[in-house]
Image: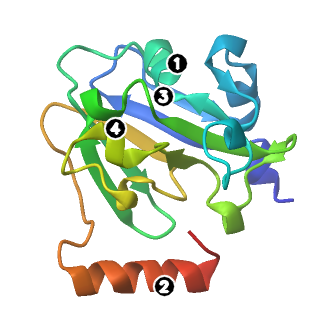
Amino acid sequence: MEKSQTDGVVLRIDGEVQRPLALTFADLRAIAAQHQVPDVSQLAPKRSGGAIRLEGLLAQAGAKPTGDYLTLHSSTDDFHASIPLAAVRDRAVLIYRLENEPLPIKAGGPVRFFIPDHAACHAAEVDECANVKFVDRIELTHGRGHDNRPTEDEAHAELHRRQEEAGGK
C-alpha cells in the first residue's frame, strides 16, 4: 500500500465553510461514531465498505448557509460534478475504507461519493453520475460549481464504458 494512502491528505473540504479541512485516512476514521456508516451494504446491498455521512463532514467543516451546491472534484480523472446540497445532504455518504484499510483506487478511492437510491432525490442534477469515484476534494459553493458530466446520451454511455474498463462503477 502506498504511504500516501495512509499518511497523506485524502480529502479536502473547502469553499463556503467556516473551517476548511484537509483530512487523512486516520482523520476520517476518528470522526464521531454517529457519523460513521460501518457497513454500506446496509444502505445498498451491492456496495461494500465503511463510510461517513455527508452531513457529519459538513458539520465538522462548519458549512455556511450560503453554500447551496456541493461540487465534487476528482483530480485522478479530471471529473467534476456539482449537485444541489439540499437534495443529498441527509442521504449521501463518502465511502473511504474497505475493512480497516483505505479504499483502494481500483474501488474508487481515496473516497467514493455515494447517494443511496439517487432517484429518490427528485433533482435533475442528481443522476447516476453524481455518484463520483476518486473524490479528493469537496467544495461547497453558492450556486452551481464546475461540472463536466456529459449531457449527451452517447457521451454519457462512453464515460461509463471507460469507467468499467478502468475498474468498474
Residue under numbered circle 4: 139
Q: Where does residue 58 sit, x and y in percent of width and height?
A: 43, 21
Q: Work out which residue is located at the far left of the displayed protein and give it.
A: 143
Secondary element type, mark 1: helix
Residue under numbered circle 1: 56
Question: Is 82 left or right of 21, judged from the image as shown?
Answer: left
Looking at numbered disc 4 in the image, what kind of residue is underneath it? Glu
Residue under numbered circle 2: 162
Marks 3/2: CA–CA distance: 27 Å
Tag in front: 2 or 4 = 2
CB atoms at circles 1 and 3 under 8 Å apart? Answer: yes
Task: Answer whether residue 8 is visible to the viewer in this image.
Answer: no
Q: Earlier in the sequence, mark 3 or mark 2?
A: 3
How many labels sit on residues? Answer: 4
Residue under numbered circle 3: 54
Give the residue displayed 46% in from the left and 43% down from the top.
115
Q: Where does residue 107 sit, x and y in percent of width and height?
A: 68, 62
Q: Where does residue 5 sit, x and y in percent of width and height?
A: 75, 51
Q: Where does residue 114 sit, x and y in percent of width and height?
A: 51, 46
Secondary element type, mark 4: strand
- In the displayed structure, 25 sits above or below 145; it is above
Q: Earlier in the sequence, mark 2 or mark 4?
A: 4
Residue 166 image-quadrant placement: bottom right
Residue 8 image-quadrant placement: top right
Residue 131 image-quadrant placement: bottom left
